[in-house]
Amino acid sequence: MAKREPLSLIMGNYTTIVIDFETTGLSPGYGDRIIEVGAVLISNNQIEDRFQSLMDPEKRISGFIENYTGISNRMLSRAPSINEVMHNLKTFLDQHHLVAHNASFDSRFLDAELDRINYKRSNEFVCSMLTSRRLYPEAPNHKLETLVRYNNLKTDGIHHRALADAEMTAHLWIRMIEDIKSNYGFQAVSFGLMQQLSRIPLKKVPEFMMKMRLKE
């Protein structure tokens, strides 16, 4: 069988997976685990595929997490193991670029659980929250729910469930790319541009955009 090329190399197009986790707490360094994953595949700036699963963290979650997420201990007791889900998630992620809102949080949990199945991620991340701060400095704040309302984006009204949040982040990501094209005259917006944009000081955004536009 011929080796399958990653979608990101086909016809010069790159693909992105937006990922979100619900967890037992704030840090895998303190023993917290993932309880749900949602992932959305974007290709040609459109949502093409989705992945979602609960995971059994092998311990009870707090009442706060139950109330915050709507995920109960009973639901998790019937869920597949984290290791099983992570193997399936690893296949779904393939070689796609990754996006998350507050990526430092999601990347830590992703890497910790992949390490448990002896796998090291090579996919690169961009933080949509940091990017949004450069594009929408006038927004009230840069929480996901606020940015969805600010941009009048599609939402089913569900928050703090992994797939719903990943879907909202995907719509935000698509809108940011569309706004960059519209406001700065880009024909295409590369993942590398979004990575760089997320890191530069706000006051240098116009200069950076002009420089990158001239390189097209």
Image (tube, helix red, strand yellow):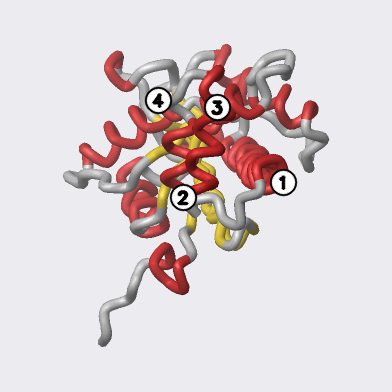
Marks 4/2: CA distance? Answer: 30 Å
Give the camera-side residue of 43 and 158. 43
Which disc is residue 214 wearing? Answer: none
Marks 2/1: CA distance? Answer: 17 Å
Marks 3/4: CA distance? Answer: 22 Å
For discs 2 and 1, the disc positioned in front in the rendered view: 2
Q: Earlier in the sequence, mark 3 or mark 4?
A: 4
* Image coords of residue 79 (percent x, y): 47, 43
- Look at the numbered disc 4 and give the secondary structure of its residue: helix
- Look at the numbered disc 1 and give the secondary structure of its residue: helix
Q: Which quadrant of the rendered structure holds the N terminus?
A: bottom left
Marks 3/1: CA distance? Answer: 15 Å
Which disc is residue 215 wearing? Answer: 2
Vertical comparison of 27 with 40: above or below: above
* Image coords of residue 106 (percent x, y): 42, 30
Residue topped by disc 4: 104
- Look at the numbered disc 2 and give the secondary structure of its residue: helix
Q: Along the horizontal axis of the image, is 111 left or right of 140?
A: left
Residue 50 falls in image quadrant: bottom right
Q: Along the horizontal axis of the image, is 123 left or right of 166?
A: left
Q: Amino acid at mark 4?
A: Ser
Give the camera-side residue of 71 and 145. 145
Q: What residue sits 20% from the left and 46% below the top? A: 119
Q: Earlier in the sequence, mark 4 or mark 2?
A: 4
CB atoms of marks 4 and 1 within 8 Å: no
Other-residue count near label 2 (Cα within 10 Å), few / some / many at <14 / 14–19 / ≥20: few
Other-residue count near label 3 (Cα within 10 Å), few / some / many at <14 / 14–19 / ≥20: some
Q: Earlier in the sequence, mark 2 or mark 3?
A: 3
Which disc is residue 182 wearing? Answer: 1
Residue topped by disc 3: 205
Q: Earlier in the sequence, mark 4 or mark 1?
A: 4
Q: Amino acid at mark 3?
A: Val
